[in-house]
Structures are given as C-alpha cells and as structure tokens.
Image (spheres, grey):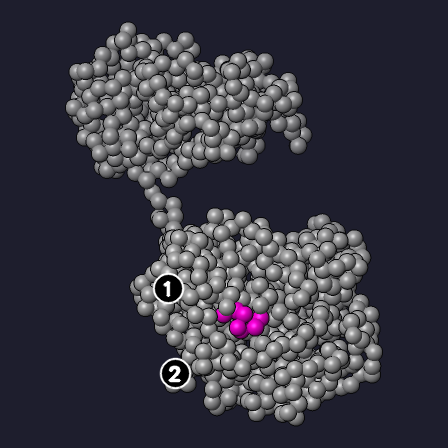
Amino acid sequence: MTSSNHLQLNRLQNGGRIDRSQPVTFEYNNKTYPGFVGDTLASAMLANGIDVVGRSFKYSRPRGIIAAGADEPNAVLQLGATEATQVPNVRATQQELFHGLVAKSTNGWPSTDNDLMSYVGKVGGRMMPPGFYYKTFMYPQSLWDTYEGFIRKAAGLGRSPVENDPDIYDQINHHCDVMVVGAGPAGLSAALAAARTGARVILADEQAEFGGMLLHSDEQIDGQPAQQWVSRVVGELVGLENVTLLPRSTVNGYHDHNFLTIHERRTDHLGDLAPKGQVRQRMHRVRAAWVVLASGAIERPLVYANNDVPGCMLASAVSTYIKRYAVVPGNQLVLMTTNDQGYQAALDWHDAGRKVVAIVDTRAEPTGACVLEAQRRGIALIKGSAVIEAKGSKRVNGVSVAAINASGERVTGNIRSLSCDTLASAGGWSPAVHLSCHTGSRPEWREDVQAFVPGKTVQKQLTAGAINGSYRLSACLEEGVRQGVLAAANAGFGQQSDDIVDIPSVDGEVEQTAPMALFHVPHTKPTSRAPKQFVDYQTDVTAAGIELATREGFESIEHVKRYTAMGFGTDQGKLGNINGMAIAAKSMNKSIPETGTTIFRPNYTPITFGAIAGRNCGELFDPKRYSAMHRWHVENGAKFEDVGQWKRPWYFPKPGESMQDALNRECLATRESVGILDASTLGKIDIQGKDAREFLGRVYTNAWAKLGVGKCRYGLMCGEDGMVFDDGVTACLAENHFVMTTTTGGAARVLEWLELYHQTEWPELEVYFNTVTDQWSTLTISGPNSRKLLSELTDDIDLSNDNFKFMDWREGTVAGVPARVFRISFTGELSFEVNVQSNYGMQVWEKVFEAGKKYNLTPYGTETMHILRAEKGFIIAGQDTDGSVTPMDLGMGWCVANKKPFSYIGKRGMAREDCVKPNRKQLVGLKTKDPQKVIPEGSQAVADPNQPIPMTMLGHVTSSYYSACLGHSIAMGFVRGGLDKMGESVYYPQADGSVIEAEICSPIFLDPKGERQNV
C-alpha cells in the first residue's frame, strides 16, 4: 500500500455541505487519499483527481465517473477492509465516505489504469457486435466451459466474500396512511401537507439528506435560500409523532395493494463494520393506504462519439459536485446542452473560478435568461452545433464541434476542435418512472417534455413533481402540496382544500425556453463507422449496436433490449434507456410512442442479501423443531435424523450395539410385544366448514362423502398431472370438522396447496384450515400387547375390537389427560395413536413407559418405522414416489374413486396417454437371491447384467432393508411392467462391478391379509 499525500487538487477552499472539521482518509486500489465527512466516495475520488474508476464490460475501455447518484453506471466498486466485510458492486456515488474505507475497482488486469484486455477491445471491438456470443461461442460445444471462464473474468462484476458476514440485518413492518417516495421539493411538500392533516406519513429518500436538487440550488423559497426552507420543513416533520422519516432509504419495490419494500442503509456510512449493537441495514415492508411518488427525474446524457472517455459527465452532476461537495472535477469545461437547465453547470463552473471553454447549444437560436447570463459573463456560446466526438483515452483532452441541422440528424458545418479536460452534456430529463412500472403500469410518452411519464394505474397512487415532467420548482412545490392533501383526504384525513397548507412561493423563478429533442448526436461518418457512441455505459451498448439489432429483425423494444443487453446492468438503464428507445425508433422509422418502452422491475437499485434475509438466517432461517418428548429421547441415547425441520429419533442404540443390531431389536420387540414411536412431527391440519367434506373429496383421489363421525380414512393426494405427492389419514371429528395428517416433511407444502386451491379455484366453498401440528403430541403404540398396555392407562375408552375397530377414533383420557386415540397402523400391527395436548406429551409418555415395563415396551425410531412399514408394503411419499408415479403405478388403484360427483385434482392428468400406456414402471417387492444381501437404495434394475453399457434401465430401488422379523432382506422398487413379471429375476449392477440378483414379488412381505392389525 502506498500513501498519496498530495492535496485534493479539485477541492474548493470553501463551500459545499461537507464537514471540513472532520477530515478522513480512504484507500482506493491500495493507495491512501484524503477526504471529509459528508463526501461520497465518488466526490472524494474526483477531489483527488482519480479519473479511471473501472473498465467497460465488453471492450475494457477506461471509464470515469459520469453521474452523482443512483444513475451512475461506471463507478461500481468492491468495498471492504477484510474478507468478511467484502461488498461487491457498490456505487461510489451512493457510498458515504468514512475513515478507513477500503475500495477497489472490480476489473482491469494487471491494473485498472493499465488493462491488457483493452487491447482486445481495440483490436477486436468490431468483431463483438450485439449477440456475438450467441454466434461465436456455440462451437465447439466442448470448449464452452473455457469460454465461460474468460467471459466471467472479463465481466468485472466484483466478487462475493468467502467468509461469513459479521454484521446483522433486520426487517420491520409498517402500516401508514400516506407513503411519500422521494424527499425533494415535491416530496417534502407532499409529506408536510399530509402530515398536518394527522395522517400517518412515511417519507423515504435514498440520499443521506432530504432536499434532493435543493441541496445544490441557489433558488429562493418563501424569501429564504432553498436549503433553509428544507431545514425548516424537515425540522417540523421531525417534531411530528405521526411522521416517520427514512433517509438513506431506497424504495426498491412497489408491489400490488400498495405494498412497498424500502432498503435502509443504517450504518454503511459509519464504518466497515456496524457499531456494536447496531444493524447494518434494514428492510422496511410498508403497506400504505395511499402512495405519493415524488421520485424526481434523471438527466439524460447525449450520445456522441467516444462519450465514455473519463471526463465526460452529466451537467447536473457537475453542478452537484461543485455546490454540494465543493469539488470541481476538472479545469477546462465544454458544455453541450439541448436545454436551458444545462447552462447551470457552466455558470457553477465559472463561479468556482475554473475556465469554461465554451457552451455548445444544439438549438439554432437559444434565448432566455440563462443564455444572457452566460453571455454577460463572457462565456463563449456556439449555437446550432454539437460536440460530435470527444478526444482522449484515459481523460478527455479535447472535443470536435460541428454545426448540425435543426432536426439534429446530420452534420452541416466544418469541424472545430476545442481543448478541454471535462465535457458535460445535458440532453433533457427522464422522469424516474421505475416504481410506477413495478405493478404493471405502462409509461406514457409526452411530446411536450420529450419523456415518458407514469401511466394509468390501479394502485392508490398519486404522483408529484419531476416524475410528471414538471421541472419548474414552483410546479414541484405546488403539485407536492396538492397531492399530499389529496392522498391524506383519500385516506380519511382532512378535506381536499388549498388552505390546509400554503403553497410555497419561489422568488425570481426564471422561465425556461423550449428544449431540443436530440437523442443521438450525428457524426460525419455513418453510425456503424463512427467511433463508438455509447447508449448504455454499463453493458457497452452502442448506437450502432441498436441499429444493427433492428436490421437483424428485432423490432419489439423488449427484444432489442434482450439482444443488445440495453438496460441489463445494475443501473437498469437509468441513463441510457430513453436514448436507446429513440435510436431504435428512428432506425425503424417509427415514433417513440409507437416503439414504446421497456418495463422496469424491482429492485430499483441492488440490495444486499443480508437486508433481504434480515434476522432470518442460521437457526432463525431454518429453525430446529423438537417434540415435547425430545429431552427423554436425548437422555435415552437416541440418534437423530433431520426430517423437514424436525429432529426425529432415528434409532435408540444400547451400549455396544451397532445400528443394525438396534434396528433388529426394535423391530422384533414391536412385532413380538409392544413398541412406541414419537409421531408428534406428522403434519396435522384442522379442517372445518360446511363444505369441508366436499373440499376433501376434491383434493383426495378417493371418496369422502360418506365418512362417518368417529371414522378415519387413508387418502392419496395428486398434483394436476396425476402424480402422487403426499398421503395420510384424515379423521372425521364432526359432520363438518376433520383433522388431516400429512407426512412430516410435506406438512407446510400440503397446507399451502390446500389454501392455494381454496383461494384460487374454489373460493365459493366455506372451509377453513389451521395447522395444529405443534398443538398435539402423538404417541404411536404398536404390537400385540398394545391393547393391554393402553387399557391400563384409560378407563373411559372401550378398546375391544368389537367397539373400537380398525380405522376408528375415540375421545377419552389416557394417563388422566384428555386424549384422542386413533386405531390406525403404519406397522401392520395392532396400533393406537394417542394424541394429547403438547404440554402433556412428556407426562403421558413417561406414564406409558411406567406401565409398559412388564411388556418390555421398546422405543423405536424412524428407521425401524421404515422397516416395519416396508414389511407391509406401505409407501412413504417422497421416498417411494418422486413426482412421476400415479396411484396405479403404485398398485393403489383401489384408492381412486372415479365416480365422485365432482372431479378431483389429478383425474385428468392420470388419463393422459402417457399415464395409461402399457409397460409403465410399477412398484413391486424384491427378494434378493442371497437373503443376507441388501440392495442399495437407488440401484438401477436391468434385465441382462451382461449387456454392454449403456444398459437398458428397467427401474430403480426406492426402499431396501434387512428384516430381522423375516430373516432376510426386503426391498421395494419400480420395474417397467413389474406387476406382470412376478417371479421373474431382475439384476442390479453395483459401482464395484458386482451384481445383485432379485426376484420380483408382491411388496407385501408380512401378513398379506392384515390379520395382525385387525386383531
């Protein structure tokens, strides 16, 4: 690292809004520079004479700072003093300076100033037109990985940190009556007007200070300097309890029903790390009754040859740096403008004591106060002309000026050369319509302002100020007041009246004369032969590229955008899109309204993943869920597995036991006496409403109309494609009241699925869903002695087979606790599922074990459950199904009722030609020829193990275990046409070269008649 001790060459001795009492230092590309609190990184870089801040995307051309805000396309840097604090793609124009800030350019090798890739751009630039990667890198296909590596390296989009972010982020939800976006003159007026009615107001602006363009304005409001008016208004808003002010907060998304997302950078300006106890960034999620968009406008640069050379800037940015940051980004200025407002940059430059070489006005006979003022100061004015080309490589050193015709389509005069080091351009203003587009509203073209303004919307939205094409300060203030009052009145506060808030007056406001519509400065050469004229700086889109795209048949502006990548950068084309659309329109001989505009989408500016995640990371993102009996499981040596978010006991090994030993013991104990499973994690959804029964019939494949109170039924759920995605047992608690069980991992998805179909397909059905998984602890008691054990714990439930049949449920008490007891079985044994309120789960569990000692009651986990159910041929959704199997493929056609009055989800999907064709893969049982050999799950079935590779695959194994109860291995899997191949052999080649032979059989290995569960 080296130190740069020179003075800030471009810093004025006085002026600006920086705090000169707080000098700081920062590091850029391993050199240290001075600055002040109140600077942005961009203003400090310009103050120190840093010209090249990056290299362009495609051609690796040197790029400098163009703008002063969110519209900056070039100064996109990597920040962070340590690996953990690395943040890519930060705009230097939006990053406030703090002591110790470390920044690096994101591309350029071996350095940004001397990038070898630039030679590729110079030599091969003409061979890289729009779409060249589609045409060039397709062949040979084998080299794509190599191409991709070079393309990504050249892209220069920064890098992600490889260490965990040490900062914390959070989120907050708001409701307000009026949300005002933008705190310039229109936004401040709107917020104050709405707030005085008593409405709850939120005012958000992306800058560190409220005021917008007033922060560098010399205008007078109500007889005082504009900055003083801003301070007075902000002071009043701070004192109002019904107002929330959010500086450094970008409204990034505007969604349906007036829902807005706001990204607040709370401590980014304080240091590399947030101060202890403070969050770095916060995401605000706002639901507003009414929204006032006062997001202002963005100045358009002019498109001319070599307009990307460092030193080419926006005129408004030049004024901002001079007046707000006391930085003059050069010594000799040439200003090119199409309008009166551009003159301000030249006047500010002159006031700063630097030389204005000339003002080049594209209008033939410009008039007005600004023109007279420039002439009064002796500034040279070149009328009816344009800068057709900038000269220089790493810094502007001159310009070529020539006369143009009145329409701005061709050069009509001789070329004149001027020496300068800064070229500012003012091509008009583009209202910042981005947020208004987020909900689908199409911008509308206004010929009088030569710009798109917000179109019609269904949102409760108003607009004020420059976003409407109202660029005069008085108009901005008036619209702000009126729209603020109207928004509050619409939200139920006050009345729409002009006397609630006085409209501020603007002293000595100068009338503006008509601007010239110029979106592409002509050159003496055709566009395709002239030096590059950049439209989108960040993605290296040129005017020639856009014209080429239209010649190649891309007529839709959305297609032009995608083919050229115009507007694809992190700046979303804030500077270039309108110019690009105009160039495309001209190339196709269409008007701009006929050509239309692209639609902007969230987010307005990039957002960190930290802000999106907030506190929802680590265990708060993926929380660990425990049943009420978890402590007992831990104390008794359980090994756990993750199922969904639940920690479920996997198996309970005793000292010296292997996993298989423990499984054998648990299986035998359950089959021979009694075992117990903690089944609390199964999804439970309470379903009520007069149409609950009808709804069940539509989401399950089988019938539910006649299920009686006190009865249970197993059901399959399919997607619209007819493929099984979940299953479970649903019990009828009352005529219009059911409780549905789902797989543990599928509970949330099933609930979402039920809500989706209710809200979008059958909203007329009166039915309500509530998840009750956490409210109930479930103890599954299985085995020949389960009835004896449970009878010792209840005296008000008749457990006899005659009065409590299989697939019945009863209500009573177990161990003195109110319970629902279901006689259902996933093991094939006599089983009872005892459900008690979760707070009593551990109490009942321990009571069951006290009573179960005489029966050798054995806890078992999920792996034993899998073995026991596989012995009975029961499926597990998600293990024995994969989204490609129908009930018929599973041999479960008995669970499909095609005669229901109303159809069910998946019925038509099952009837598709592919789903009913012969020889589909079907679920079968598999018995290995070597009874001790367990087929690995996922093994592929083949008919001939000696067939050369690639072998013909017949199916695969889904479940495979060793059964201690049967004394041999068992497996379930899919085999093509398997139900017709009973008794045949199938082979499973393994990775080690061995082959396992198995006989196709019924998937029911134990008690095919179901006598054990019906005893």
Identity of the residue drawn at 39% across and 48% down: 621
Say few, some or many: other residues with alpha carbon within 10 Å of mark 2 (under 14 / 14 to 19 / 20 or more): few
Distance from Cα at disc 2 to Cα at disc 1: 37 Å
949 relative position to 23: left or right: right
Up/down of 3 relative to 648, above or below: below
Asked whether 699 or 846 is in front, the reply is 699
Say few, some or many: other residues with alpha carbon within 10 Å of mark 1 (under 14 / 14 to 19 / 20 or more): many
Asked whether 72 or 15 is in front, the reply is 15
Q: Give the range drawn in magenta.
A: 471-477
Is 475 inside the magenta-drawn segment? yes
Up/down of 988 relative to 621, above or below: above
Q: Which amino acid does label 2 sit on?
A: Gln
Q: What residue type is labelled 1?
A: Arg
Q: Quadrant of residue 912?
A: top right
The residue where tag 2 is placed is 22
570 relative position to 230: left or right: right
Is 816 inside the magenta-drawn segment? no
377 relative position to 711: left or right: right
Q: Position of residue 944 (x, y in %)?
A: 63, 23
Identity of the residue drawn at 48% across and 63% down: 482
